[in-house]
Image (cartoon, rainbow, N blue to C red):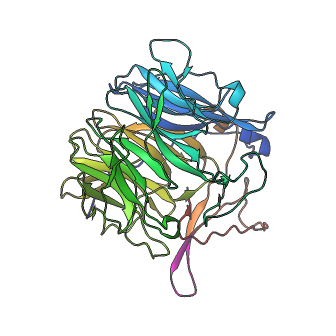
Amino acid sequence: MLKGRTDELELEHKSAQERGMTIEDLFQIRLVNDPQVSPDGTHVVFTVTELDEEENRYRAAVWLVELTEDAEPKRLTSGRHRDGNPRWSPDGRHIAFISDRDPDEVGKGQIWLLPLEGGEPARLTRLKESVEDFAWSPDSLRIACVSKVQDRDADIDPDSDVRVIRTVRFRYDGEGYLDDKYRQIFVVDAHNGHAQQLTTGRFEHQHPAWSPTGHEIAFASNREEGWEFSSVRDIYVGRPGSKAFRRVTDGSGAWSQPSWSPDGATIASFGTRRLESDSARTELFTVPAGGGSPISLTDDFDRSLRDGSIADLASYPGRPPLWDANGQSISFVFSDQGSVQLARRTMPDGELQVLTSGRHRLGGIQQSPGGGYVFGVNDTTHPGELFTSDADGRNIRQLTRFNEEWLATTVLSQPEPFWVDSADGRPIHGWIMKPIGFEPGTTYPMLFEIHGGAFGMYGE
């Protein structure tokens, strides 16, 4: 089933002085992420995040680079704030991004618009809660976004520090107390910022995706009573201005990140029907846009189509299934023995082609109009940079080098992979990291760090 692969991707290793990494080095690392190819395929916009030691916070700027040999990136925003999620308008005239730059609402991310002909970013949305995700309409006139809305009972004082817990899901790791706030989808006028709430109710709604005509928006949710006790998540479709939604999938699995085919006839998504499994792998599904039973296109591929890496630095955004411009293939990443690779499935009944190999973590994939790819890559001794390749994964070229100077002064331990049989004979994968300046025959103390799975993996 797997087609033979192409060039192996390798990051450049520079010689360095014999100096090991220290805590202070964390503030020298620059995190390069979230590439987005311009509609005409000539530029890539992306983010660079740095750690501010003095203020104990992250700062991120939006950058731009041409897709040409030896092009120098240029910064578009100041880097004094936390700017992220840059997205081109389909007409190429604006870049929208989420930022906490309003001094009156520090920490609350809203959508800002940056005109490409020049000028300062202007705030577009003024929602009560932060914007978590958004997508431009095909005509560049509207933006669908996700933000929380509080649905608190009238008898609860909103200013009280007392919490009345009436739901099973009342707190999440990394998010804290939910406080009766539910993710809803809004449609925002890209000219005046007027926001119309599309979804309502005590349900979670995520991953808005416009149809190619701009008449409908697909999203992921479970809008059935008792959803808190269920693993089911369906794909729904609604029209801006209407409160009526149709369920596209059949309620037999958990699906997310809908992606319309270029002709609007099919919706692809990631998901699983193995709801009772302890380690259900993520598969690629398609379903008619009018509704039906989703069909898995990767049922016989024994890898999960997601970035399962547990990492301290790079955190590549999950992309929906990427259709090519002609609807002839769908691209995605998958996890395999500590690495994350790029692959595609040809349509309608073709083969699964693995496009990259090697010890690395690849993510944030994007396709240019010509079919080539832009993506982020990091490995055990590189925090990560952006790369490009042809449509078949060949001619891989490094696009950015933000960490080159730091790497030239610091020696990092290269983890060596090994396998060991467990008690039942099942092979277990791991790495050993030797200290800088390791000398064979010398005894060193050993520290064990163990992770048991099953949904995540330590990675490259």
Q: Residue at x 27, y 42 (%)?
A: 324
Extreme top residue here? 118
Extreme left residue here? 349
**Residue 428 highlighted magenta (yes or no):** yes
77 up-or-down from 148: above or below: above
- Magenta range: 419-429
382 with respect to 342 (left or right)? right
Q: Position of residue 358 (x, y in %)?
A: 45, 54
97 with respect to 267 (left or right)? right
Q: Residue at x 28, y 51 (%)?
A: 267
Q: Quadrant of residue 176?
A: bottom right
Q: Can you see residue 363?
A: yes
Q: Nearer the viewer, residue 170 or 281?
A: 170
- Quarter of the picture containing the N terminus is bottom left
Q: Position of residue 170 (x, y in %)?
A: 64, 61
24 with respect to 241 (left or right)? right
280 up-or-down from 385: above or below: below
Extreme bottom residue here? 424
- Quarter of the picture containing the C terminus is bottom right
Extreme front residue here? 155
Q: Quadrant of residue 264?
A: top left
Q: Position of residue 410 (x, y in %)?
A: 70, 41
Q: Can you see residue 397?
A: no
Q: Nearer the viewer, residue 358 or 17?
A: 358
Q: Position of residue 293 (x, y in %)?
A: 26, 64
User: Count the marks: how many?
Assistant: 0
361 with respect to 452 (left or right)? left
**Residue 302 highlighted magenta (yes or no):** no
Q: Nearer the viewer, residue 19 or 334?
A: 334
